[in-house]
Amino acid sequence: QVQLVESGGGLVEAGGSLRLSCAASGRTFGRYAVGWFRQAPGKEREFVAAISWSGDRTYYADSMKGRFTISKDNAKNTVFLQINSLKPEDTAVYYCAADQFNTPTMDRRGYDYWGQGTQVTVSS
């Protein structure tokens, strides 16, 4: 069993940056792939990025390439999502999720554990 807690969200002006964190407890992230998803009001939850357990493979949604960077620190059991040049359309609740089979995927059904999310609000 893995418990995930996201943090780092907040209110930021357009053009700013945020670094979201996803901390794991219960078991380490050492053998889990981790993904970030986001859900804006009235919209489906969408894939943002994913990383393999070793950190050597990263994946991004096409629309997220360039401004989003996923990384991890296994020693700290934490995965990060750096978001630069924030836009109002990035406003959403951001969730991290873990896959016990280390298969980073864009499909949210491929993840076994989810955090509660952290709110990101970007003002114009």
Image (spheres, rainbow, N blue to C red):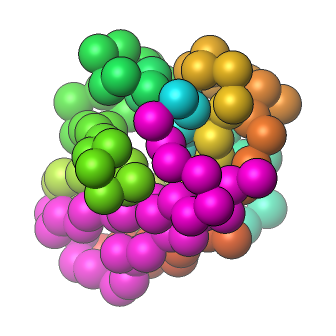
Q: Residue at x 53, y 76 (%)?
A: 119
Nearer the observer, 80 or 89: 80
Residue at 45% x, 60% y is: 22
Task: Classify residue 105 as left or right of residue 20.
Answer: right
Location of residue 67 in the rendering, given as x and y in whole percent from the top left corner: 23, 40
Q: Residue furthest right?
A: 109
Q: Position of residue 105 (x, y in %)?
A: 63, 20
Q: Is residue 75 above or below residue 124?
A: above
Q: Is residue 14 magenta?
A: yes
Q: Nearer the viewer, residue 56 or 7?
A: 56
Residue ID at (68%, 55%): 2
* The image quarter in which residue 124 lies: bottom left
Q: Percent position (x, y) of residue 99?
A: 67, 32
Q: Residue furthest bottom?
A: 11
Residue 36 point in image, percent of width and height: 53, 44
Q: Is residue 116 above or below residue 24?
A: below
Apparent side of residue 43 relative to residue 7 in the rendered image (left or right)? right
In the rendered structure, the answer to whether residue 60 lies left or right of residue 86 reads right
Residue 4 in sight: yes
Q: Which residue is more in the foreground, 26 or 61?
A: 26
Name the quadrant containing residue 63. top left
Give the number of callouts: 0
Residue under the image location 38 percent in, 83 percent down: 10
Q: What range is drawn magenta here?
A: 1-30
